[in-house]
């Protein structure tokens, strides 16, 4: 079954058959699947929520079906969360690259679309936690306790996504202030046209980032 660009059946099967020693493999697979799904749509908060919900529910369904007595369900869910975090970290980086392009072309941080983009970045970690929490509340009862423990631990620790989003907003603000002092305000019409389709542009940047990593590794992406 495909939902939000995620092959749910494949993910359920992967978690249901995972051994106690496959934590890193689960994390990588979830990260890859989440990133691929994010690349397949405009990178809006609404679409991010939909992807995170689907991944959370599929990983939970697979973990619930795992018959191995030695498997630590909470550890499996922690790896699922970490995989989603890794994918969202790439989404934040794509936002950073796009925003820096706009600032270099003279778009100010007070422009409506720029303010909205920065606000959405600041909401990224909250969106992450809220989406997974809501999805976890809809899974089977035996999984709700482990998910609650995972989320509590991650909130105390913080996510890579949240840390990078905060840093990105600070960097873009500083860059914009520098551009303003330098009197840069060129190509505003072109920049404005790009800002009007910001989410689609960031999605394109995200795809380009992944293609660059794939070429750099010398290995074809699966």
Image (tube, rainbow, N blue to C red):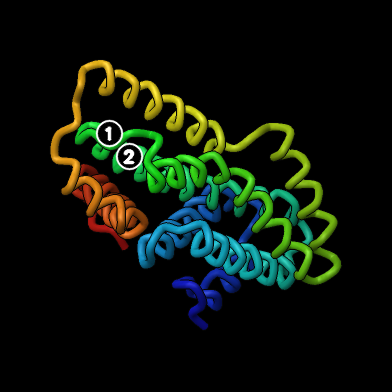
Task: Report the front residue among 5 and 140.
Answer: 5
Task: Name the one closer to the observer, 195 or 100.
Answer: 195
> Residue drawn at (44%, 72%), measured in percent from left and top?
5
Question: For the image shown, how many numbered marks are present on the structure?
Answer: 2
- Residue 202 rendering spot, x and y as whole percentages: 33, 52
Relative height, residue 172 to residue 48 (above, below):
above
Left/right placement of residue 14 relative to residue 89 reads right
| Residue 198 can be seen, yes or no | yes
Residue 107 lies, with reference to residue 58, above or below; the image says: above
Gap in angstroms between the C-alphas marked 1 and 2: 6 Å
| Residue found at the far bottom of this picture | 1
Residue depth check, mark 1 versus mark 2: number of the one nearer the observer:
1
The residue nearer to you, when weighing 6 against 43, is: 43
Q: Position of residue 179 (x, y in %)?
A: 26, 23
Q: Residue at x 37, y 41 (%)?
A: 111
Q: Residue at x 71, y 68 (%)?
A: 66
Crowdedness near tag 2: few (<14), some (14–19) or many (≥20) residues, C-alpha within 10 Å: many
Q: Which mark is residue 66?
A: none
Circle 1 residue: 103
What residue is rendered at 65% in x and 34% in y? 158
Q: Is residue 53 left or right of residue 198?
A: right
In the displayed structure, 78 sits above or below 13; it is: above
Task: Tell me the SS state at disc 1.
Answer: helix
Q: Position of residue 108 (x, y in %)?
A: 32, 34
Q: Quadrant of the C terminus?
A: bottom left
Give percent across and percent down for residue 25: 51, 53
Tag 1 near tag 2, CB within 8 Å = yes
**Residue 86 visible to an observer of this rendering:** no
Relative to residue 123, is residue 186 drawn left or right?
A: left
Number of the label disc, if any, that sits on residue 99: 2
């Amino acid at each position: 079954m495909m939902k939000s660009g995620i092959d749910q059946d494949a993910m359920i099967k992967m978690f249901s058959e995972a051994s106690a020693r496959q934590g890193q493999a689960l994390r990588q697979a979830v990260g890859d699947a989440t990133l691929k799904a994010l690349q397949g749509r405009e990178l809006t908060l609404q679409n991010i929520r939909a992807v995170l919900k689907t991944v959370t529910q599929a990983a939970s369904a697979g973990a619930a079906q795992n018959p191995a007595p030695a498997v630590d369900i909470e550890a499996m869910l922690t790896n699922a969360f970490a995989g989603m975090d890794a994918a969202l970290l790439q989404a934040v980086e794509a936002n950073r690259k796009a925003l820096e392009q706009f600032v270099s072309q003279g778009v100010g941080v007070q422009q409506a679309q720029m303010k909205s983009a920065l606000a959405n970045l600041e909401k990224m970690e909250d969106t992450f936690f809220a989406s997974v929490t809501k999805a976890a509340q809809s899974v089977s009862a035996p999984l709700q306790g482990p998910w609650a423990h995972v989320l509590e631990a991650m909130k105390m620790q913080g996510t890579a996504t949240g840390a990078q989003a905060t840093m990105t907003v600070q960097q873009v603000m500083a860059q914009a202030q520098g551009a303003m002092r330098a009197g840069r305000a060129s190509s505003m019409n072109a920049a404005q046209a790009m800002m009007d389709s910001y989410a689609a542009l960031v999605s394109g940047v995200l795809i380009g980032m992944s293609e660059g990593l794939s070429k750099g590794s010398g290995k074809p992406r699966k």
